[in-house]
Image (cartoon, rainbow, N blue to C red):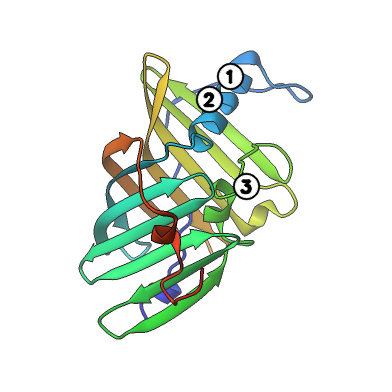
Amino acid sequence: MKWARRSLAVLFPILLAACHAGQETRPTCELTAISQVESYLNDEKGFEGQFTQTWPDGGQSSGRVVYEPGKLRLNYEYPSTMIVVAKDKRMVAKEFAHQSITRIGLSRNPLGLMLQSPVHLVKPILVTNVQRHPHQLQISLASADNPSQGLLTLRFKEELGRLTLEQMQAVDVRGGRTIMDLRDIQQGVQVPASYFAYPDGQK
């Protein structure tokens, strides 16, 4: 299964004006940014929108994304229909064309870094980089215990102090890079709890 060989992970950093940390303490600008991202990812209202995903081999997929703290569902619509649910330290994907199920643990997958509930960007998460640019904030995350397992970079649009996630970038343990560009993001998603049930029939 082609998708099973691809893991959601982060990508090339975007060149923005960096906010450099000292060796022992982080500057106020970084602490503020980290707090903003934590608040965004822990917002119980969640968000939904459309995505276009570029895989390490250059192929593209698109569909709809729904996020609530600790939970993510991706409804792939192109080029084939697939549902992916990620939560509770594992990710399950169902590809409808072949009626196949793939299960992946998130403990060593960069995506798992943003799916803790609640999200705390402290150990075991390592914030490796914070970059600001007018109307834009980017933060990179890794596992503090094993940073070589992968990197997750989240890029946000920032307007009047409010963040909107516009890109997730991932680099997996093999160096494979995946980009997920988000658009038409709306806060305040309301879906039943069953919406985040695993597509293999498990809760």
Please tell me whether residue 13 is drawn above or below residue 134 in the rendered image: below
Q: Position of residue 182 (x, y in %)?
A: 30, 43
**Closer to the eye: label 2 or 3:** 2
Say which mark, if any, is on residue 142: 3
Between the C-alphas of marks 3 and 1, the distance is 19 Å
Q: Can you name the residue that lies furthest to the right here?
A: 24
Q: Residues within 10 Å of mark 2 (few under 14, many from 20)?
A: some
Name the residue tied to disc 1: 32
In this rendering, position of residue 18 left or right of residue 62: right
> In the image, what residue occupies the spot 52% across and 47% down?
152
**SS of the residue under disc 2:** helix
The N terminus sits in image quarter: bottom left
Q: Amino acid at mark 3?
A: Ala
Q: Residues within 10 Å of mark 3 (few under 14, many from 20)?
A: many
Badge 3 or badge 1: first in the primary sequence: 1
> In the image, what residue occupies the spot 37% across and 17% down?
134
Q: Amino acid at mark 1?
A: Thr
Name the residue tied to disc 2: 36
Say which mark, if any, is on residue 132: none
